[in-house]
Image: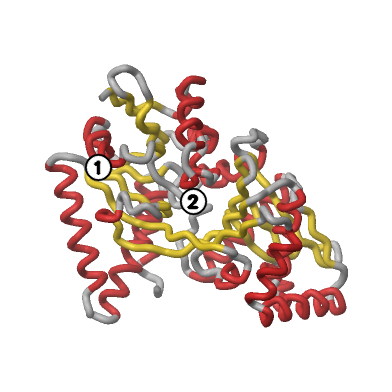
Amino acid sequence: MQVRTIHPDDLSHKDVREWEAIRSESERFRSPYYSAEFARVLGGCRKDARIIIARRDDGEALAFVPVQISRLGMARPLGSPFTDCSGPILRLGDEEILPSILRSAGVTAYGYAGLDDSLGVFSEHHRAETLAYIADLSPGFEAYLESRRSAYPKHFKKARRLSRQAAREAGELEVCFHEPAPDILETLISWKREQYQRTGLHDVLAPDWSRAMLHACLTSESPILSGVLTTLRIDGKLAAIELGLRSHDVLHGWIAGYNQDFANYSPGILLQERLLQGACEAGIKRADLGGGAHHYKKYYGSDTVALSEGLVPACGFGGATRSMLGDAWMMLERAPLGPAARFAGSARRRLDNILAVETTFGGRARGVLNAFNKPG
């Protein structure tokens, strides 16, 4: 087996063809995050962006692993912590070679989050799991919406009431499925940064590279990867914005925010149904709504997928050491210790986000100090 590590800018046309060929073989890799074009976008934003490529001795492509590698040899999915879905792009049945690939690349371990492992091939490495919601739009929007209304009549009754209330009290509602204006994206970024400030979460949009990534995705117009910026206006004023990523007939909701002036009308809910209608009209067959804190997503998901978080150690001493340290910390998180266990989990997630997004020592130091001076 031959393994090399390159910058995304150095991907050849042959590399991209083989990458997309492996991706097309499995439903697991339909998300735009798995596309070669997404890695190329990140390559223009992060200096530490790397692609680990493994080939058989005869030259056949085995795996493409887009990563950002720390000075201590820890590999995270390229684009972390923004990648809702991530994982190595390899053929089903070749998963067992990943530890050997990592060792050959000089990596001690690969920490993943958002891995669709529905077949359980990495189950021994999983440490946490979350549900993500999928909207199947292939039957058409009316059929899709009727199925959701039948499943959750109270929610959709509330959504209609909020829509009428907003129109009556604030003004006409207007949705544009794709409005690719950089100033609108900047408005969304400012809303999100204000949200991080209010909630005490680490501001992942403070580093220059993260904002550059969003703008680069917005301007991408490849069938493999394109940005979709959807807006909701009430009385002509921006009320909600969502940036999504499209790959062929799949749309993944990514960064969403809303204007606090319209908070009483739940603009995120008002936007969601209209966004999905626009997506269907634009040829989208599957919309990944994501998971996490947005509880209303379950009402729009016709299916769910379990996304796993975990750590694959490389073969050898370095990987074993990294794995033992990770296992010890997870034992603390799962121990019946009440607040102490919850703090361990919160601290790990915050620290991992900081180490992933901050590329300078100063940024990491400030992030860690701020994180442990705030609740949660």
Secondary structure found at label 1: loop
Q: Quadrant of the N terminus?
A: top left
Q: Residue at x 49, y 30 (%)?
A: 21
Residue 82: give its label. Answer: 2
Residue type at mark 2 is Phe
Pick whichever, 292 or 133, lies toward us. 133
Residue 215 showing in the rendered view: no
Q: Is residue 225 above or below residue 284?
A: above
Q: Dot 1 surroundings within 10 Å: few (below 14), some, or many (20 or more)? A: few
Residue 72: give its label. Answer: 1
Residue 7 coordinates in the image, percent (x, y): 42, 28
Q: Is residue 306 above or below residue 105?
A: below
Count numbered badges in the picture.
Answer: 2
Residue type at mark 1 is Leu
Residue 161 coordinates in the image, percent (x, y): 77, 80
Residue 266 coordinates in the image, percent (x, y): 69, 74
Q: Quadrant of the C terminus?
A: bottom left
Q: Residue at x 42, y 64 (%)?
A: 130
Secondary structure found at label 2: loop
Q: Is residue 199 above or below residue 221?
A: below
Q: Residue at x 54, y 70 (%)?
A: 198
Indicate left or right for 69 with 291 as reference. Answer: left
For marks 1 and 2 on the same chain, the one whose residue lies earlier in the sequence: 1
Q: Dot 2 surroundings within 10 Å: few (below 14), some, or many (20 or more)? A: many
Residue 294 showing in the rendered view: yes
Q: Do tag 1 and tag 2 residues touch (Cβ < 8 Å)?
A: no
Q: Residue at x 72, y 54 (%)?
A: 230
Indicate left or right for 251 with 363 as reference. Answer: right
